[in-house]
Amino acid sequence: MLIKRKRAWDLPEAAATDEAAFLNRRAFAKLFAAGSIAAATSSVPFAGPAEAAEAVGPPAGDPSAGMYPFERNGAYALERPLSQERLVSTYNNYYEFGSSKTIWRKAREMPVRPWQVQIDGMVEKEQTVDIDDLLNRMPLEERLYRHRCVEAWSINVPWSGFPMAALVDFARPLSGAKYVRMETFVDRDVASGQRASWYPWPYVEGLTIEEATNELAFLATGMYGHPLPQQNGGPLRLAVPWKYGFKSVKGLVRFTFTDQKPLTFWHEVQGSEYGFWANVNPEVDHPRWSQASEKFLQSTDDIGFAASPKEVPTQKFNGYGEQVAHLYTGLEKEYGVKLWR
């Protein structure tokens, strides 16, 4: 007799409310752009209906649009409704385009074709593959994931893409490879944030091989049933739902397999605050604000400095501990409870 064990986050698929149910077409609203939920904020005008329509949906001319939507994998459900697509498309961190939460206007100008992905380092054969060729080679699906920012806000997103383990299999790493180093694009003509010389471009992130091949590690190529908008990391980004959002590097162009722990972007910028592991842990505060709770953003009305009824306790590993806690067994002695540093 086959017995299916209920996962920590499981609910019936019908319990995940469709994004369309949350669309709010108010003509204008005032939002707060925050460096963090715990920091002071300044009001900015929100996009009107025409701008909102421009902000959501696939990039113009994306040749992969006809492949969507992908079949949803019912093993990855949510206990909270999906966040509104308009919110997810316009409330973004993407330092390549600037440090504000309104970078979507600049990011939408970035071309997503041609786009090639380089695979190198400790692999059987180094190669460069076109993004559309890669899509045709991968097992494509949709997953509902929670996303937790280190700034103490969270969203629920229907990501489309493929397990990162499939890319690792495709790359055929050598037995000595211990890490996957990921690198974003560099195009200072389009990405004005990359002209900031005080940041170590390109944006670099990394995972251990064990993390990269965990069932939850996901390479996203789309969301809400269509290709990823540029501001959300299109055409290729990482989604690791048990880690803080800054680990989910956007605009990926390179995967390097190595036996050396990568020096990641935020660890290089501010290592005392943003470390390699970046696992969600409510027991470990950010040096400048608490991580014990989070503000769940469902619609654009939720963005602001004031406390919200949707503020909820943060879960360790963002609620995915059943699937990933074993990856860090024994590391407590080396890193204490500070596994996100």
Image (tube, rainbow, N blue to C red):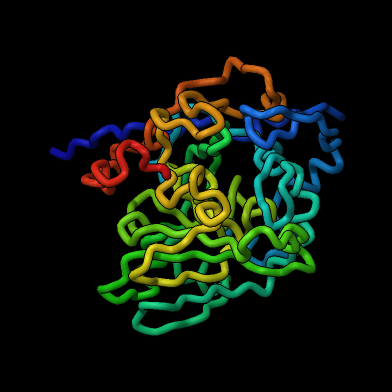
Which quadrant, please, contains the N terminus?
A: top left
**Residue, far bottom:** 125
Describe residue 235's horizontal placement relative to residue 181 as left or right.
Answer: right
**Residue, far left:** 1
**Residue, far front:** 272
Residue 220, visible in the rendered structure: no
Query: 212 and 121: which one is in front?
Result: 121
Describe residue 29's horizontal placement relative to residue 2 as left or right.
Answer: right
Q: Position of residue 87 (x, y in %)?
A: 68, 36
Describe residue 272's horizontal placement relative to residue 92 as left or right.
Answer: left
Q: Position of residue 3 (x, y in %)?
A: 19, 36
Query: 232 and 174: which one is in front?
Result: 174
Query: 300 and 97: which one is in front?
Result: 97
How many marks the image carries: the answer is 0
Q: Position of residue 284 (x, y in %)?
A: 41, 32
Query: 67 and 190: which one is in front?
Result: 190
Res 253 quadrant in image: bottom right
Q: Residue at x 67, y 18 (%)?
A: 306
Does 284 appear above or below 55? above
Q: Residue at x 65, y 40 (%)?
A: 88
Residue 95, visible in the rendered structure: yes
Q: Residue at x 59, y 75 (%)?
A: 116
Res 97 quadrant in image: bottom right
Q: Position of residue 109 (x, y in %)?
A: 79, 60
Q: Residue at x 67, y 74 (%)?
A: 114
Which quadrant, please, contains the C terminus?
A: top left
